[in-house]
């Protein structure tokens, strides 16, 4: 009886091995081609980290060129907000890119100075690697 099952066991084992290899290669290719959505861009991750760590220099570097007054207001807002919030979590929800335009969406959880926890979404719109809109 064992001799009768041996060929079937070999076929089953080879089939399992082949399906594993095809799945591993196919999964990597699907992920690489971004079939199911765009990957998080380095610029959007850098912007979000700068926003949560209250680094106005990095935020200004990733924003389009503005006048001196607008930059001064950004610095003042950053100094004013310093120590008032504590980031708890940052989750990338997804995004899309079409040419130079891309939109990336995040979910952020913060703790205010009062101890209250807040959870909100934030969408970043990039054009040529610069944030042009934050919602």
Image (tube, helix red, strand yellow):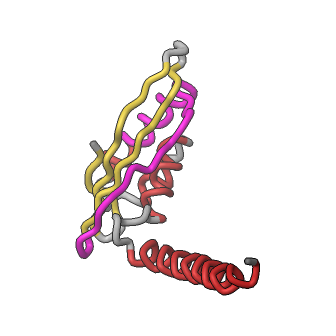
On screen, residue 55 above or below 61: above
Task: Please indicate whether residue 132 sits to the left or right of residue 76 in the image.
Answer: left
On screen, 27 above or below 130?
below
- In this rendering, is residue 74 above or below 128? above
Q: Residue furthest top?
A: 114
Task: Tell me how many marks there are.
Answer: 0
Locate residue 129, reporting x and y percent: 36, 67
Residues in magenta? Answer: 73-100
The residue under the point 34% across, 55% down is: 104
Of residue 14 and residue 5, the one placed in the foreground of this image is: 5
Q: Nearer the viewer, residue 57 or 95?
A: 95
Which residue lies at the image location 41% right of the left edge and 40% below the top edge? Answer: 107
Verify whether residue 48 appears in magenta: no
Which quadrant does the C terminus fall into?
top left
Q: Position of residue 14 (x, y in %)?
A: 63, 84
Residue at left 36%, top 66%?
38
- Left or right of 104, for residue 18: right
Residue 97 x/y as whole percent: 28, 68
Q: Front-most of 102 and 62?
A: 102
Q: Position of residue 90 (x, y in %)?
A: 50, 42
């Amino acid at each position: 009886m064992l001799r009768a099952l041996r060929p079937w066991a070999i076929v089953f084992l080879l089939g399992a091995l082949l399906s594993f290899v095809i799945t591993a290669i196919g999964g990597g290719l699907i992920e690489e081609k971004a079939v199911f959505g765009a990957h998080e861009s380095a610029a959007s991750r850098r912007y979000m980290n700068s926003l949560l760590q209250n680094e106005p220099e990095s935020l200004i570097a990733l924003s389009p060129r503005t006048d001196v007054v607008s930059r001064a207001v950004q610095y003042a807002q950053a100094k004013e907000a310093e120590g008032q919030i504590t980031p708890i979590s940052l989750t990338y929800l997804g995004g899309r890119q079409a040419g130079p335009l891309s939109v990336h969406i995040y979910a952020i959880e913060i703790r205010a100075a009062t101890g209250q926890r807040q959870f909100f979404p934030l969408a970043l719109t990039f054009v040529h690697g610069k944030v042009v809109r934050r919602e």
